[in-house]
Amino acid sequence: MRNGGQGAFGALLRELRLARSLTIEGLSEASGISVRGIGDLERDRRAAPQRRTVAALAEGLDLREPERERLLAAARAGRSSSYRPVGVRSFPRSVDDFTGREREMDLLTALAGEPRARPAVVAVSGTPGAGKTTLALHAARQVADEFPDGQLMVDMRGTHDSPPGPAELVVTVLKALGASDRELSTAGPQGHAALYRQVLADRRMLLVLDNAEDETQVRPLLPGSGATLTVVTSRRMLTGLEGVHRLWLGQLTPEDAGTLLASIAGTERAEAEPRALAEVAERCGYLPLALRVAGNLLATRTGWTVRRLADRLAQEDRRLDVLSAGDVRVDAAFDLSYRQLTPGAARMFRLLTLVPGTDTSAASAARLTGQDLYDAEDTLEELVEAGLLGAEGSRYRLHDLLHLYARVRLGEDEPADAVDRSRNELYRWLLETAVVAGRWYDPDHGEPPDSWRGTVDLSDAERAREWLQAEAANWLVALRAASEEGRHAVVVEVAEAMHWFSDQWIFWGHWREVFDLAVCSAEELGNPVAEATQLNYLAWAVLLCEARPRDSLAVSARALEVAVRAGDLTQQAWSHQYSGWAHRLLDEIEEAFRHVDAAIGLFTRADDVNGLPQALLHRAILFDRVGRAEESIDSCEETLGVLERIQGRIAPHLHVFTTIGTRQSIGTALCTLGRWTEAVEQFEMGLSLSREMGNAALESRALVKLGDALRSAGRHEEARDCFERCVSLGPDADPQRVSTARERLAQLDSAG
């Protein structure tokens, strides 16, 4: 690369060497720089030297300060004029309506502005259509002034059938920076990489490597020294790159998605139909590419209402066809990544659409494909690496639009009989595992039998609960399918296994459906004991989970009728227990007492250790309701005595569950008597047990009761803390108690 600046350095070096009567060999010996290197510098055959090389030459020449500075200045001039300036004006056109991505822009801006002695690399990956290139272009224009030595964007063509190799790309960058054919020829193919590193060393440039194929293509283009910021965009996560900052782009927030749509389609139309605009954004999966296509459709179809587009997108089987504007199609972006998958990963991608819920695990995926667990994990990670699958912890999720695309591929690329086999195997496994997990809470079962060989860890009750909750949407659909297929024994078995577990997750929202399906299946099986049992479970769900005590009475009455016909004392007792509970909530106390007394008698006759303590506790609650607080406390003490006698026979979690209720009932009775300090002690014991149990519903109740007692005792700040903790418990808390806690906080605020 000949130019005036570099030529001046070579001439000056030769002048200074000759002035000291040194040969090239002599200067080489004195400076430690090779004979060839000095000769190339003097003949202008290599790039201007770096500072450390100039310093070594100055030492070898024994230069005084003025001459040393003169040589350094010539070297700097050579470096600054050796290469053509490049800038963002040569970049592809970016968008003017860039929206969102504040966190990502903050990182890129911070890296661009910070002083540093080493290069920095940012790897931007994400879902196809997430706007990786758009982010890189927008950031480049925002931070261009931070890079006085230029900005360069290289299209790596990573999704092409034959993307360029790193050697070709190195030459591309060198030529873009002004390297002459002569210098490239002199360096030779083996020297291009060294020349590349030398060109970028001690420079502050912005280098954007867009649409990279993989780490092998990228790694040789990463500068080893200097202050260059390299931004790499890729559909792959480029996990093999070390020491890089990582940005993963997914969907926009609903707010940013609406803003982007409005900026493209027009603010006036967006403001006229805000609900329809929100539906369009949601049906685009908040994915930037889909939002841009939808926005362009609205901008060019001025006769369309936003509602019209929203309704067209509502048809899932046509949604990807609708998301097409000119030569831009959302599914085309997905196809580029799909066709780069290995056959096994492509099949996994298709079959994941058979998962009924929004996410899944490696164990479920293994059932779909027939792989062992570790192979399935590897295949899932290939999909994650390709940007086609999201991962959070141990759960995997397809983006909504990718799910639709994969479903199309499933129909076209997978035989129908293979699809049915995979779905059936997944559903069978889900229900079998649900039974084993649910039985952890059943007093007659507990831990899995030695014969069970599962692919998930159900080694304790807590892990069983985690699995049941994580896979709830999936095993519920499998249960519906079993009911529709007439597999009634399976439906009843699953519901029975869920019974005791349901106390751990009261407000899931689907227990009525689970037990309703089981009632129908038990009836089809002609099994009155099972039918009465499932009717009682259904009565519980309607009464407690859905807070409909009046409606539950008809269910518990039907349960009693069937239980009497079957001669089952235990189910008769439970039907009375639930009827008494409903009457109490309806303030029909006389009827409540009648049913509870009947339940106590029947549980005693049946020697049912699980039901008797609950019936005794129920009677204590009724005593307090009618103002007989002392009798309520006595009845609670009787309940605690029974719990102590039957410990070891009653299910452990049920023992704790009933103890919590008993402590809270004693506390309530003490509040009736105005004995606040003693009441607080009882509520605190109940709260401690609720936390140990990990039951948010019970904890929310305990917190409200404790908060009320503290408030009555004049301990307002402690009460406020209880109510605030209740509100923060999350969706598994009792919604009525959360609502009460909010009311109490408002009252405390208004009271000053």
Image (tube, grey):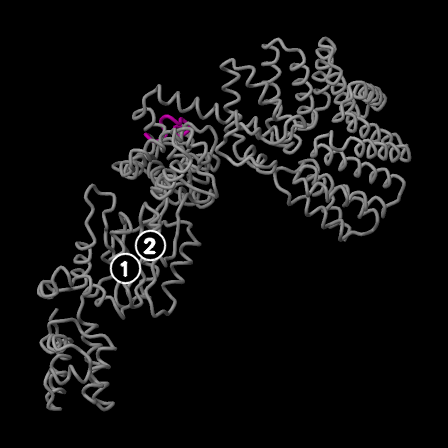
> 151 and 201: which one is in front?
201
> What is the secondary structure assignment of the residue under circle 1?
loop
Q: Which residue is mark 2?
A: 241
Identity of the amino acid at label 2? Leu
Residue 344 on image: x %, y %: 32, 33
Q: Residue at x 17, y 54 (%)?
A: 168
- The range drawn in magenta is 312-321
When asked about the image quadrant of residue 409, the answer is: top left
Q: Which residue is mark 1?
A: 222
> What is the secondary structure assignment of the residue under circle 2?
loop
Quick check: 105 above or below 545? below
When asked about the image quadrant of residue 502, the answer is: top right
Mark 2 burial class by Cα count in 10 Å: few <14, some 14-19, many 20+: some
Cβ atoms under marks 1 and 2 closer than 8 Å: yes
When asked about the image quadrant of residue 346, the answer is: top left
Total numbered labels placed on residues in the image: 2
- Whole-number angstrom distance, CA of label 1 to CA of label 2: 10 Å
Residue 34 on image: x %, y %: 15, 77
